[in-house]
Structures are given as C-alpha cells and as structure tokens.
Image: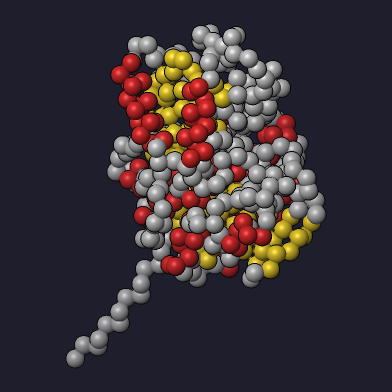
C-alpha cells in the first residue's frame, strides 16, 4: 500500500526591494548613457528590464515619495509640497502604503534611508507598516538632521547631526542585515537613499576615486551599495524570488545629468520628472529588455500587488499594473493621461507619445522671484511636444496637431473633476491670469495691463 503523500508546502510569496535615489538624473547611470561607472546597476539592467519613459509623480522629494508608496498622486494624499523640520503635516492617515498592503501576507518590512513623509511620531515609518526604520526623517540639507532608528515601537535618536560621510555604508549595513534576518519569511525592503541630494559626501573608500569629482564618488558608492544588496539576496538563496527595483525621486538638482532632457529638479519638464528605472527578478522579469512604455512610480503598488497576490487598497489608484511590461508580454500598456503637478498646480500631461504643457511658473524654482512673486501662469496657446522623437521638448507642434491638443485637454478636464478641491481651485486661479502673447523660449509673463 502506498503511503499518503504529504501536502505540498505553500509557495512563499516573492520578496520586494525598492532602492530609491534622491535627485539622481536620467543620465547619471552607465546604462542610460552616463560616463560615470555604475557596473552593478548596469548589470542589473542587463539581467532585467530598463524603463526609458518612467516618470516620478512630482519633481520634488516628499511628493514623489508619497506617490511611490501609495500608488496615488501626491495631491490626493496630503503631500503636494516638500516637508521641512517645522512642518506639522505628513502622509494622510487613511492612505495605505506598500508595506501596509503586504503585512497581511506575513511580510517582514523595513525602511532604511530618507523618509521625508512627516517627522512627527504619527507620520513616521512604524505607523506606515514598517517593522523597523533607520535613517534621516527628511533631507540632509535641513537642520537639524537627526539619524534615528525605530524598532519594536521604540524610537531612538542615534546622532543629533547625522555623519554624512558614512551614510551610504551604514544604510547598506542595515539593509543587508535586515535581508539576512528576514530570510525565512517574505520581506519588503524600502531603501530611499539620501544621495545624491546635496550636501554630498562619500566614505573614505570612495571619496576622490571618481574622475568626475565628489558627485561621481557618490554615484559610485551608491552603485556599490546596490551590488551589496544584490549579493546578499543571492547569499540567502532568494535571487529568483526577489523583485528589485531601482529608481530616483526626481531629476538632478545643481549637479548630475538629465540625460539630454530639458529641465531639472523642480520642473515638470522632462528632466525634472523622467527618471531612470530598472527592475530585476531572474526567471520572472525579462532579461536584457528595454521598454519605452509610459510608466510611473505610482505603478509600483499595483504591480507589487499583482506580483504578490496582496489585496489592493480600496482607495482610487492612479498607478496601473505594469507586470506585463516587466515580463515582456507587451512593450507598453494603454493608460489614461499621466498628469504632472508642481505643488497643487496642474502643469502638463503625458498621453501616448505626446506631452501637453498648459501652465508654467514665471520663474525657475531656485531663482529669485520676479516682481509680484512667483506665479503659475497659463500657456496660451498650450505647448505640445512629441517626447518620443523630440526628447528635449524643443519643438512645439501644437499648431499642427489641434486634435491631439483637444484630446489631452479633454482628458485633463475629466480627470481634474475627481481631485481634491485645492487642485481645482489652483487650476481656476491659474486660468484666470491674464498673460502676454507667447514668446518662443521665454517663461510666461503677466499681461502689462494687469497690476501687481
């Protein structure tokens, strides 16, 4: 008589690691055309999928992080602007993060790095589904910059002023230790690095080693950190069961390369919001593929939900599941127009190969404001760019494509009706401004007859 066969052990859900750089430009990685040496990230791209039209939901730190973790526009989740040490707000309490979505499946969760979604106790990572946290609660150019850790409900300040030179190796040590400790259960590691946000610094092992100055040193140390995380995942035997995603929160600030894209951090031009993204999971994510499909940081939550089988939040998601792109079943997925905000202000939208600009500030974000202050002004007429063929948004083709302009404007209008009242109020305020006739290559200006 044959012995009864024991039931098969339930399949372990896949692990997820998101490594998120701060102010890293589209052109700062070797696999995106940079002269900087990034061998680990280049290898990760050769073993996975590299996304070439991947967008952050905002051109600044806090809003982009809120969208990555929730799959929703920052203007929906209470973080339209960058938060500071004196801020009293943070990510809305009712929002569900990736960590909270995964916890019911038994995931161990950790956040290592820059949080920047509220520094008061009710907004910190331990209230957002993370079992542990180690890092700086906001940007490294803000004072004070405490290095804190959270574990088992206890928050401890390790340094009142975090030592910048040792941040990357300390983050890496914490991240790899968590992976080893969590090896017997599914885990989610969210690793939002502090760098290359200024002020920059690197450890003794990397400082002065790049021919491209301190910025190059920092990028090479970030690349080393990615390599250490990948090696640790291989060491615990979970290489084929772990999705690793690398991206950046927005475009480069004063240093770094937007990769021939127009604009930088703080702008909804391509250089401020189009960022590198690499995904790797051997045997699941396609090897050595590139996709020019329109994708977004907001797609991470629904994609991870599909990968792991986790139940999605009940709230309206703005991101879509892009697993078919990562698994090379399709090059792109039809999606609604992707809106681009600067704070509360709706400025442009990407739809298919087109990008329509309907508003722009009358000064650059880090320049002195003009008389009357910095204003978000309407573009009359709107500007339309084919950002597939015209990657640096050099040639306005709105006049030749009126049907496309109307289509995108209609989509923007329909979507706007579902946003919080401040978004609609700011849009109404913008369109009421009287502006000068457009001048090629100039920022929009107020009409001379309008008093300041």
In the image, 334 versus 323, the foreground residue is 334
Left or right: 336 as drawn, with respect to 140: left
Left or right: 312 as drawn, with respect to 359: left
| Residue at the farthest right position | 160
Residue 61: where, in percent of width, then height? 61, 41
Which of the 4 quarters of the picture holds residue 62?
A: top right
Left or right: 361 as drawn, with respect to 305: right
In the image, 144 versus 53, the foreground residue is 144
Residue 32 in view in this figure: no
In the image, 107 versus 74, the foreground residue is 74
Name the image colouring.
secondary structure
Residue 160: where, in percent of width, then height? 80, 54
Above or below — where is 184 with respect to 94?
A: below
Residue 112: where, in percent of width, then height? 63, 55
Residue 6 in view in this figure: yes
Quarter of the image containing the C terminus?
A: top right
Residue at coordinates 77% horizontally, 60% vertically from top-left? 158
Residue 9: where, in percent of width, then height? 35, 75
């Amino acid at each position: 008589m044959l012995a009864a066969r024991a039931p098969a052990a339930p399949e372990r859900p896949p692990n997820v690691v998101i490594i998120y750089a701060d102010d890293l430009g589209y052109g700062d990685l070797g696999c995106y055309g940079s002269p900087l040496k990034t061998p680990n990230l280049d290898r990760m791209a050769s073993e996975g999928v590299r996304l070439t039209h991947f967008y952050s939901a905002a051109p600044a730190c806090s809003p982009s992080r809120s969208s990555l973790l929730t799959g929703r526009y920052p203007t929906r989740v209470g973080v339209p602007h960058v938060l500071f040490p004196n801020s009293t707000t943070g990510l809305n309490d009712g929002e569900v993060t990736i960590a909270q979505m995964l916890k019911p499946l038994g995931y161990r969760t950790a956040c290592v790095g820059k949080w920047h979604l509220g520094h008061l106790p009710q907004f910190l990572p331990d209230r957002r589904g993370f079992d542990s946290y180690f890092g700086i609660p906001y940007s490294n150019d803000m004072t004070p910059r405490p290095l804190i850790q959270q574990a088992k409900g206890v928050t401890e300040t390790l340094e009142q002023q975090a030592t910048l030179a040792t941040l990357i190796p300390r983050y890496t040590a914490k991240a790899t230790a968590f992976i080893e400790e969590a090896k017997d259960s599914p885990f989610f590691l969210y690793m939002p690095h502090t760098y290359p946000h200024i002020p920059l610094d690197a450890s003794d092992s990397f400082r002065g080693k790049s021919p491209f100055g301190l910025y190059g040193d920092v990028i090479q140390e970030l690349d080393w950190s990615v390599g250490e995380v990948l090696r640790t995942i291989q060491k615990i035997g979970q290489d084929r069961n772990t999705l690793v995603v690398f991206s950046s929160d927005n475009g480069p600030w004063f240093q770094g390369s937007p990769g021939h894209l127009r604009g930088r951090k703080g702008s909804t031009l391509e250089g401020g919001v189009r960022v590198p993204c690499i995904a790797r999971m051997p045997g699941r994510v396609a090897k050595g593929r590139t996709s020019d499909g329109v994708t977004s940081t907001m797609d991470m939550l629904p994609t991870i939900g599909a990968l792991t089988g986790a139940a999605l939040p009940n709230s309206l998601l703005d991101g879509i599941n892009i697993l078919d792109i990562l698994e090379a079943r399709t090059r792109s997925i039809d999606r609604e127009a992707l809106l681009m905000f600067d704070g509360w202000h709706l400025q442009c939208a990407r739809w298919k190969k087109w990008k329509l600009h309907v508003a722009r500030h009358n000064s650059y974000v880090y320049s002195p404001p003009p008389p009357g202050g910095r204003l978000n002004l309407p573009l009359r007429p709107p500007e339309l760019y084919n950002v597939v063929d015209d990657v640096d948004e050099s040639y306005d083709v709105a006049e030749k494509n009126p049907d496309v302009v109307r289509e995108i404007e209609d989509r923007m209008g329909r979507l706007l009706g579902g946003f919080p009242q401040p978004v609609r109020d700011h849009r109404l305020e913008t369109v009421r401004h009287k502006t000068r006739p457009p001048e090629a290559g100039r920022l929009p200006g107020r009409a001379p007859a309008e008093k300041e």
